[in-house]
Image: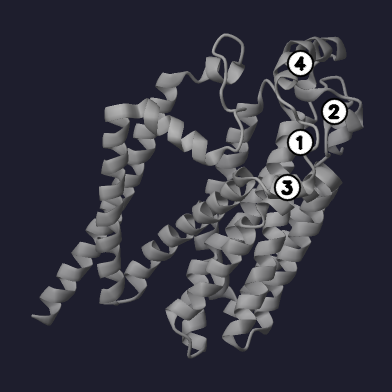
Amino acid sequence: MNPEELHSGKRKIFYGWFALAGVAIVIFIVGGAFVHSFGPLLPELIGEYDWSRAEISLALTLGILAFGLPSPLFGILVNKYGPKYTIIVGNAIAALGLAGVYLAQEVWHLYFFYIIAGLGGGFGGYIACTAMVNNWFIRRRSLALGIFQSFAGLGGFVFPPLTTALIAAIDWRASWLVLAGLILVIPVFIAGVFLIRNKPEDMGLMPDGMPSDAFIEYEKTQSHSSADGDSSGWGGLKVLKTRTPWFMGGFAAANSFTVYACVYAGSSLFWWRDRRLYRGLVGGGGLTLVLMLAIGLGAAINFDWLFLKFHLISFANDLWMLDPSTDYLIMLFPRGFWFDAAYFCAAATAFLALVLGGVGWWRLRKNRNQIV
């Protein structure tokens, strides 16, 4: 029985949950194969070719930039063609890029194929998937997005040991083909073709499975918000001329790069005895601690000023200025929430920097003792 038949049965499970399962599978497989599998495969590339770690690592850096920086263009294409189409096409391109690594003989071949994989993963990744979630859920959107995001983290937990097992069972070149095949079979065919639908209206449904009259009433209560802002004339060129989409694309690339750096550094600590890496961890951890301390002090001294400057840099309009008496976002997440969230993010980042810096210092000290 397929999901649509199950939806049409007596229990009438809202189809949005099947669509959500589809995009969760996409981000789990693609993120795991594209980013989190690179660490275990890195020493195999070093052992096979006369390339340095820096040269090989640049491939993933370029792939991540290709994944994140064109996000405004990806958003325009998702809006034009719909999430389903972009998820299918984008992830098919990502699978092609990873499969191409099997043929790499020069380091620039690795760069080329990983840029292709990054472009495909970005085109059929976060933007398309979150757009699909936003189409299907309104009242339960936060829950749906939380479930979706959790699968991205799950990929970082599952794929490193999975890739290590693949390398042990077959050779590292064939492992790239297996990872590409996983993307092609699961995100493209199972999720993209069979599970994902662009929006509930395509199936005669309403977001969250609401009855039609309840949804119409909900839309009326929200109409005043859209009436306050002028959304006309927002064509592709006008969007590209604003700061916000490029800022978001840069943030996506930086976020993905940070995730990779943590995975790479964590695995490298136990595979290589390179004092430069350990010194870099100590220096980077110290610098991060100083930056987080500065942010924490700024928030403690004048949080409102810091909050205001952040939004003035991030937004090219005043749509972020919400009314606590009418806007649900500020009702659900008042000023105190953002204050606590800023402290939590700063503290979590500082803790991670302290751990990585401490491990780097420990390895430096251990190597020094061995020399003595």
What is the CA distance from the residue labelled 1 to the residue labelled 3? Answer: 23 Å
- With respect to residue 247, does 204 lie above or below? above
Please name the amino acid that badge 3 sits on: Gly
What is the CA distance from the residue labelled 2 to the residue labelled 3? Answer: 30 Å
Question: Element at badge 1?
Answer: helix
Sequence-wise, which precedes: disc 4 or disc 2?
A: 2
Screen quadrant of the N terminus: top right
- Place of residue 272 in the rendered image (x, y in percent of width and height, measured from the top left): 34, 76
Mark 4 touching mark 1, by CB under 8 A? no
Disc 3 crowd, CA 10 A, few/some/many (<14, 14-19, 20+): many
Sequence-wise, which precedes: disc 2 or disc 3?
A: 2
* Residue positioned 74% across, 70% down in the render: 96
Report the mark closest to the observer, 4 or 1.
Answer: 4
Residue 276 appears in view: yes
Disc 1 crowd, CA 10 A, few/some/many (<14, 14-19, 20+): some
Residue marked by disc 1: 18
Report the mark closest to the observer, 2 or 3.
Answer: 3
Q: Which mark is residue 75?
A: 3
Sequence-wise, which precedes: disc 1 or disc 3?
A: 1
**Residue 10 figure quarter:** top right
Residue marked by disc 4: 223
Residue marked by disc 2: 7
